[in-house]
Amino acid sequence: MAGRSAVGADEPGGAVSRVYAHLRGQIVDGEIPPRTKINIENVARELTLSQTPVREALQKLEADGLLDYVAGRGYTTTPKLDLAGLDALFELRFLLEPWAARAVATDRIANPAAKLHDELTRFESNIQRGGDLRQVVLAHDNAFHMLILTATGNPLVRQSFEQSQAHLHLFRLSPIDHDGSIARHEHATIADAIGRSDPDAAERAMRAHLRRSYVRSASAFDVQDDSRIERAEQFPGVSSLRMVD
Ligand SMILES: [Zn+2]
């Protein structure tokens, strides 16, 4: 019980969470560019907080891969993903997520369709409410994919995705989905297939979503459209989509 009120306890709305969300938003939106030094005193002053929660938030951002710590130099923002990093991230996602979509569509007890539709409804109302749309899309994308991975009941699968911090790094690359309509449409297709307990359709919808996400994300790099599609087809199981997609 005492631990809950300890300094820096990471409660929603607590000081650490506030600094974390503030800086994370600025880094993902590019307001703080890559390789920029974070001045702890300035951040603390700007948010009228002591330096302790700021330091704790910076450690969390380091764990997310958004900051690097160098002794004597302090914290600087990491470079954005390069194309090889993007490929590695999608290779992991193609290994985990189509399997996860199939698995949860097969298991009627663990079927997360109701939760997925709730998340889509929440997303819709958060968009209506206004605010920072990009952060709303980011939070939804992460929540949606995590619900499916969590429903597999395999904690290692969930952790692998969590540790990749996929959503943070992808949103940092480029404004992928300005108004959230792409996520809404593609996620609804996945949720519907899972809801029908149709493993083939769920797996296919997830692969198609990942393939399109890859092609959208790779537009941040100087790669021709054709070659982005070709690259997307190198991922495990993707070439089978040619016929249906
Ligand atoms: Zn998504």
Image (cartoon, rainbow, N blue to C red):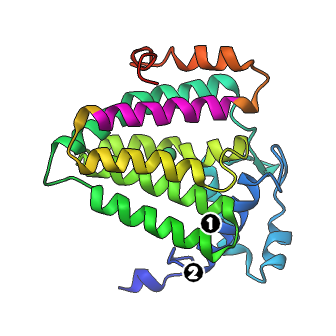
Q: Which mark is residue 13?
A: 2
Residue 79 % position (x, y): 75, 38
Disc 2 residue lies near ligand 1 with CB under 8 A: no
Q: For this view, does 23 lie left or right of residue 65?
A: right
Give 45 or 187, whichever is nearer the viewer.
187
Q: Choose top left, top right, bottom left or bottom right for residue 95.
A: top left
Q: For this view, does 192 lie left or right of residue 234?
A: left
Residue 143 % position (x, y): 45, 57
Q: Is residue 135 above or below residue 15?
A: above
Q: Which mark is residue 139?
A: none
Is there any visible trace of residue 63 in the rendered image? no
- Residue shown at 20%/45% (left/top)? 197
Residue 214 % position (x, y): 58, 31
Residue 193 % position (x, y): 30, 44
The magenta region covers: 201-218
Q: Which mark is residue 56?
A: 1
Dot placed on the residue nearer the N-terminal end, 2 or 1: 2
Q: What SS does tag 1 mark?
A: helix
